[in-house]
Image (cartoon, rainbow, N blue to C red):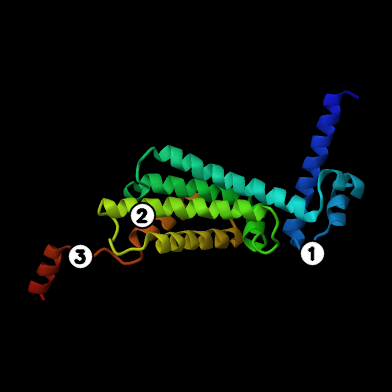
Amino acid sequence: MSVQNGANKKDQKRKAFLEAARKIFSEKGFQSANVTDIVSEVRSGQGTFYYHFKDKQAIFDELMIGFVDKLLTALAENQARSAGRLALANRELAIENARRIAAVYMENMDLATLFFRESRYVGGTAMQRIEQLYTIIFSQIEAGLAEGQALGLVRADLDPRIAARCFAGAAECVIQQELRADGPRDLDHIATQIVDFQSLGVLAPAPREAHAEKHVSGS
């Protein structure tokens, strides 16, 4: 057997363990799953598992870091696509950015569910990457809000730090609920509703002054 073939087999076995762990963790949860479950799914020996991974925590961390990296990539691509444009002032850009982020969750539903359900409670090295993710999310939203204030698009009395966390938390709640929903998911609708809620709120537009005056004079 060549060195190349040996390396390929090791890589395939590692991927098999990761896929099995992804399935087992999604079905049973991190706490209830064990290495034996993963090994049985792959039909391999525990010694082979421990050759590739230190323990259950290590393989969970690798799965979570891989998922978070997809989100970080989407955030970086959104930033690059914006090219200096302010999403607050460009509804279509904001919707497309939101859609791309939502797509990462919906295209990786099992990992996304684990991310929301368990990643914050089991510790591990993935927590550092998750903290990095939220730091970037908050800083991007804060910067956009501050720029919006400078342009007169955002209330001057708004606290960008607090508002950024409100925006992120609300969007995250929507994504979590959509992950639990049955049936197809309309990413365009989800993204549009998130963006319009963040930028327009829930109050109907105030009637035009002329219309209001006409209504009063005719009453």
Residue placed under numbered mark 1 in the picture: 32
Between residue 28 and residue 161, name the one nearer to us.
161
Quadrant (top left, top right, bottom left, bottom right) of the C terminus: bottom left
State how far apart marks 3 and 1 are (Cα): 57 Å
Q: Are marks 3 and 2 in contact (CB under 8 Å)?
A: no
Residue with the mark numbered 3: 207
Question: Horizontal and vertical percent for residue 127?
Answer: 64, 56
- Residue that carries the numbered disc 2 in the rendered image: 145
The residue positioned 66% from the left and 59% from the top of the image is 119
- Amino acid type assigned to the residue bearing label 1 in the image: Ser
In the rendered view, would you say 215 is above or below 10?
Answer: below
At which x and y percent is residue 200?
Answer: 33, 60
Q: In this view, does 118 lie above or below 61?
A: below
| Local crowd size for mark 3, using a 10 Å CA cut-off: few (<14), some (14–19), many (≥20) | few
> Is any atom of residue 141 visible in this view?
yes
Instruction: Residue 45: tell me if it is visible.
Output: no
* SS state under label 3: loop
Looking at the image, is 178 positioned above or below residue 87? below
Inspect the image, locate mark 3, and give the three-letter code of the amino acid beneath it: Pro
Q: In this view, does 120 lie to the left or right of 157?
A: right
Towards the viewer: 172 or 128? 128
Look at 79% across and 55% down and name the residue there: 56
Q: In which quarter of the image is the N terminus?
A: top right
Horizontal side of residue 121 vs 196, given as left or right: right
Write the residue at 70% across / 62% down.
122
**Dot placed on the residue nearer the N-terminal end, 3 or 1:** 1
